[in-house]
Image (cartoon, rainbow, N blue to C red):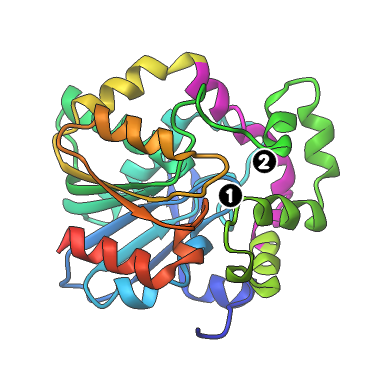
C-alpha cells in the first residue's frame, strides 16, 4: 500500500470550485479521455474514503469525487439546509460546470440517498448528466432496517445534537469509524488521523450535527420518493456490499436488489461498512468489472 496522504497532501491532489455559492473540494484524477466515474461519499467522512482504490480505478476511468458541503474540505456554512436534496443540487451543478454529460456513478452510504434522488430527477426532467451505470455500496438506506450507532443516535436527536457536536473529538471520531470496520487490521491510525483532520477543519463537528438531519429525511420526509427513485432507475445497477456491515446490514442490500430492476448483488465476505478501505483490491475489481 502506498503511504497514507495527510490532510495537506490530500488537499494538494484536488482543487476547489465555486458551486451554487459554495466552495466545493473536488478530486479529479485519471485519463481525460476515459469514461467518467462520479463518486458520492458517505457520512461522516469525505472523498478521502476512496484514496486506496483511486490507483486501480484511474487505470480505466476518469474519477471525479467531491466533498459534499459540510464534509471534508468543502464549505461548512451554519445556515445551509444540509438536505440531501440540496446535496443533489450541488452534485448536478458541479458536474454540469465540469462539462460531464455521460458518466457512471458510485455511491456509498449517505451518497446512496443522493443517488436515489438523482434517479428520480432523471424521470422528472432532462438532466445535464446522463448516468450510464450505477453502483451502490454499504448503506443504511432503509432507516427502519439500519442499525444506527450510538453517535448517530446522539446526532439525530435535536435536543442532544448541539451537545454531541461540540463534544466530538478525534478520539471519539476514530472510535466510531473503527466500530464499523469488520477487519480491524484494515484500518490504520494514519488513515483515521487524516479523516479526522479533514472532518474537523472549519468547525466540521458542528456541520456533522447539522448534516445528520438526513436521517429524518430517510425516515419520514422523502422515504417514498427515494424508494420510487430506485424503482424507476433507468441505468443498469449493481450492489457491492460488505456482508459484515453492522449498520447497513445484508438484509438492506437484499431489499435494494429486490427494488431496483435487474440489479446485480455482489458480496464481499467478511467486510464491513467501508469496503473501499477494507478490501480495496477486491472492491476495485468488482467496480471495474461491472462498469467495463
Find numbered disc 2 in the image and state the secondary structure of the residue it sits on.
Answer: helix
At label 2, counting other C-alpha atoms closer than 10 Å, the crowd grade (few under 14, some 14-19, many 20 or more) is: many
- Left or right placement of residue 267 versus residue 86 in this view: left
Q: Position of residue 150 (x, y in %)?
A: 73, 36
Q: Which mark is residue 207?
A: 2
The mark nearer the N terminus, 1 or 2, is 1
Q: Is residue 89 visible?
A: no
Q: Position of residue 187 (x, y in %)?
A: 61, 68
In the rendered view, tell whether residue 4 sits above or below residue 143: below
According to the picture, the residue beneath numbered tag 1 turns out to be: 71
Q: Nearer the viewer, residue 256 or 29?
A: 256
Quadrant into which the C terminus falls: bottom left
Residue farthest toward the bottom in the current orientation of the protein: 2
Residues drawn in magenta: 198-219
Q: Quadrant of residue 207?
A: top right
User: Magenta includes 265?
Assistant: no
Residue at (58%, 49%) from the top-left corner? Answer: 71
At label 1, counting other C-alpha atoms closer than 10 Å, the crowd grade (few under 14, some 14-19, many 20 or more) is: many
Residue at (30%, 71%) from the top-left corner? Answer: 57
Q: Nearer the viewer, residue 118 or 179?
A: 179
Residue at (19%, 36%) from the top-left corner? Answer: 127
Q: Which mark is residue 18?
A: none
User: Magenta includes 199?
Assistant: yes
- Left or right placement of residue 103 versus residue 47 in this view: left
Check whether the beta carbons of the residues at disc 1 and disc 2 lie within 8 A of each other.
yes
Q: How would you classify the magenta stretch by its main secondary structure?
A: helix
- Left or right placement of residue 270 versus residue 282 in this view: right
Q: Position of residue 130 (x, y in %)?
A: 16, 44
Residue at (46%, 51%) from the top-left corner? Answer: 41
Q: Is residue 223 visible?
A: yes
Amino acid at each position: 500500500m502506498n503511504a497514507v496522504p495527510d490532510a495537506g497532501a490530500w488537499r494538494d491532489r484536488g482543487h476547489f470550485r465555486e458551486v451554487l455559492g459554495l466552495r466545493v473540494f473536488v478530486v479529479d484524477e485519471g485519463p481525460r479521455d476515459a469514461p467518467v466515474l462520479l463518486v458520492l461519499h458517505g457520512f461522516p467522512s469525505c472523498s478521502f474514503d476512496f484514496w486506496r482504490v483511486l490507483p486501480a480505478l484511474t487505470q480505466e476511468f476518469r474519477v471525479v469525487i467531491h466533498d459534499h458541503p459540510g464534509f471534508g474540505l468543502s464549505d461548512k456554512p451554519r445556515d445551509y439546509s444540509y438536505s440531501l436534496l440540496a446535496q443533489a443540487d450541488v452534485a448536478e451543478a458541479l458536474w454540469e460546470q465540469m462539462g460531464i454529460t455521460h458518466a457512471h456513478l458510485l455511491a456509498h452510504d449517505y451518497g446512496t440517498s443522493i443517488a436515489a434522488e438523482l434517479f428520480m430527477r432523471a424521470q422528472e426532467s432532462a438532466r445535464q448528466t446522463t448516468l450510464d451505470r450505477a453502483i451502490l455500496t454499504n448503506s443504511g438506506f432503509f432507516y427502519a432496517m439500519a442499525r444506527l450507532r450510538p453517535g448517530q443516535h446522539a446526532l439525530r436527536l435535536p435536543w442532544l445534537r448541539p451537545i454531541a457536536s461540540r463534544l466530538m473529538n478525534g478520539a471519539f471520531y476514530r472510535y466510531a469509524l473503527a466500530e464499523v470496520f469488520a477487519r480491524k487490521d484494515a484500518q490504520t491510525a494514519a488513515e483515521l488521523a487524516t479523516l479526522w483532520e479533514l472532518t474537523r477543519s472549519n468547525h466540521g463537528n458542528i456541520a456533522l450535527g447539522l448534516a445528520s438531519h438526513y436521517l429524518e429525511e430517510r425516515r419520514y420526509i422523502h422515504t417514498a420518493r427515494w424508494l420510487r427513485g430506485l424503482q424507476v432507475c433507468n441505468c443498469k445497477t449493481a450492489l457491492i456490499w460488505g456482508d459484515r456491515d453492522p449498520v447497513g446490514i445484508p438484509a438492506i442490500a437484499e431489499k435494494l436488489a429486490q427494488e431496483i430492476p435487474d440489479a446485480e448483488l455482489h458480496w464481499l465476505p467478511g467486510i464491513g461498512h467501508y469496503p473501499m478501505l477494507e478490501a480495496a483490491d477486491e472492491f476495485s475489481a468488482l467496480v471495474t468489472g461491472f462498469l467495463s
